[in-house]
Amino acid sequence: MRHAIRHAAQLRIDEGNPLLGNTIHHSDAGSQYTSVRFGETLALSGLVASIGTVGDAFDNALAETTIGLYKTEAIRDDSPFRRGPLHRLTDVELLTAEWVHWYNTDRLMHRLGRIPPIEYENVHYATNAAHSEAAHP
């Protein structure tokens, strides 16, 4: 998990949109998320930790929804992302990386106007850059 966070943060830097310390990483209260090393990884990557209340499913609704989508779209036996049985951790890691890439770059999101999240994000940054330049010529 720590490697994935560092990789994602570096990807943001490479794309010219670094995490600025105000992006929230929300999780449940599992030990992997409450460890000092994990907290340090978040801080060094420009993320702020947010841990849900123990036993409160509503507190973690977004994460639970995403996990449900992941299980339905990526992990199920007839998923188009599966190329056979999941015997090794690397099988799950590769499948997950492909699903996350598809989810962010190709999946049409109704609430975003039926465009992929990456397109919406690009418009957001372009619009904010234009407003910033107009305010500070």
Image (tube, rainbow, N blue to C red):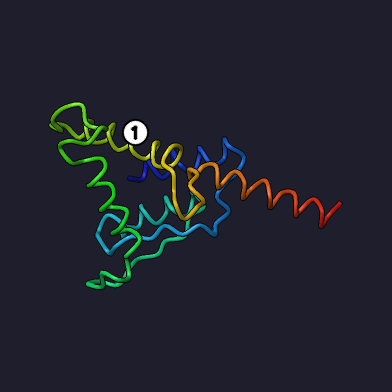
Residue type beneath disc 1: Glu
Who is closer to the viewer here, 85 or 39?
A: 85
Residue 2 quadrant:
top left
Q: Is residue 130 left or right of residue 66?
A: right
Identify which residue is drawn at 54% across, 59% down.
22
Q: Position of residue 50 (x, y in %)?
A: 40, 64
Q: Position of residue 83 (x, y in %)?
A: 20, 26
Q: Farthest residue in the top direction?
A: 83
Q: Residue at x 34, y 33 (%)?
A: 98
On the rendered structure, is 107 left or right of 121? left
Q: Is residue 129 left or right of residue 35?
A: right
Instruction: Count residues near mark 1 (Cα–Cα under 10 Å), then give few for <14, some for 14-19, many for 20+.
Output: some
* Quarter of the picture holding the N terminus: top left
Q: Residue 103 location in percent, x, y?
A: 39, 42
Residue depicted at x 51% and y 57%: 23
Provide the residue designation for mark 1.
98
- Give SS at disc 1: helix
Q: Residue at x 23, y 31 (%)?
A: 90
- Return the x and y of residue 16 as percentages of the image width and height: 62, 40
